[in-house]
Image (cartoon, coloured by chain):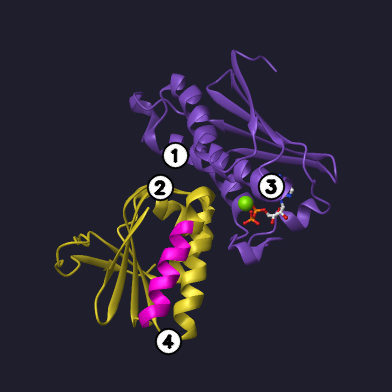
Chain colours: A purple, B yellow
Amino acid sequence: MNTLNELKCTFPARSENESFARTMVCAFAAQLDPTVEQLADLRTAVSEAVTNCIVHAYRNTGIGSITVTVRLLPDSVIYVRIADRGCGIADIEQAMTPLYSSAPAEERAGLGFTVMQSFTDQLTVTSRPERGTTVTMRKKLLNGTDPEAGC
Amino acid sequence: MVELRQEPQKLTAFLSGELDHHHAKEIREQIDFAVREQFPPVVVLDFGHVTFMDSSGIGLIMGRSRLTEEYGGRLEIHNPSQQIRKVLRISGADRLAVIRSRVTETPQQEGKEPEHEYAQ
Ligand SMILES: Nc1ncnc2c1ncn2[C@@H]1O[C@H](COP(=O)(O)OP(=O)(O)O)[C@@H](O)[C@H]1O
Ligand SMILES: [Mg+2]
């Protein structure tokens, strides 16, 4: 993987960091001068992944850390990896099923993975129970000032 | 953030800022407290000043939809931005409530009728 630029950040799994994390990724991605809509998609997808670490991986305890890595790859592709060392996911297929949530009582909609999938070009989830979960996403960002981008 | 306006037949919740997991709980508690006080026939969630929403907002809409359904009330979603409408669309939440755009109301002043209405 030919990485042109990279940002890595580790922070505690506290809910007030949700906003900071998605903003940080978008600030990094802004160097590609993407369209408003594409940046909004990326922001939403990152928010879902980070929120899952806080809500599920560490079960709202605020204890534990999340590592976000953002890379700029050739052809205007942004790569984001969001990793936790929390409880892990036993059945990834079930977890990714639209509307499935292990925490419906907390009014989770069960649509986080659906959002990540529809708002990025590629999503991968790897997980091991009691070891943690890593989500990676890739999205090609079209230049917002490029007339051929068709935004 | 949420500002509430209670009228005899209607409760309007003017939401603002970023509707994520961090902010959803407090918004939910304030809305539900007001709903349970009067069980209004119409509950409006006005997204006019919401700058960001993820699926936590869908959870909020689903929960309020369930709550209003319990006593025969109706839920409406007003003024979602492009970004919010996209999240509503992929989640199918646009089937849980009537969505209206360009409804000009503020917590202080009585608004005019919507110029535009659609249910997708
Ligand atoms: N980082 C994670 N660690 C542990 N479990 C997770 C993680 N991310 C997702 N999950 C599991 O996958 C399910 C579905 O996630 P998602 O689609 O975001 O829905 P929601 O967060 O609304 O429950 C969660 O309910 C949870 O059981
Ligand atoms: Mg989620």
In three-dimensional space, the C-alpha distance between marks 4 and 1, rounded to whole angstroms, equals: 35 Å
| Mark 2 Cα shell of 10 Å, populated few (<14), some (14-19), many (≥20) | some
Indicate which disc, 1 or 3, sits on the residue closer to the N terminus.
1
- State the SS at label 4: loop
Q: Which numbered mark, 2 or 3, is in the foreground of this view?
A: 3
Given the image, what chain letter belongs to the residue carrying mark 4?
B
Q: Amino acid at mark 3?
A: Thr
The verdict on a common chain for dots 2 and 3 is no
Rendered-image quadrant of the C terminus of chain B: bottom left
The x, y position of residue B62, in whole percent, is: 51, 68
Q: Is residue B89 left or right of residue A77?
A: left
Q: Is residue B113 left or right of residue A72?
A: left
CB within 8 Å, label 3 to label 4:
no
The verdict on a common chain for dots 1 and 3 is yes
Q: Residue at x 28, y 77 (%)?
A: B10
Q: Which residue is mark 3?
A: A61
Q: Residue at x 22, y 59 (%)?
A: B102
CB within 8 Å, label 2 to label 1:
yes
Indicate which disc, 2 or 4, sits on the residue closer to the N terminus.
4
The x, y position of residue A144, in whole percent, is: 37, 27
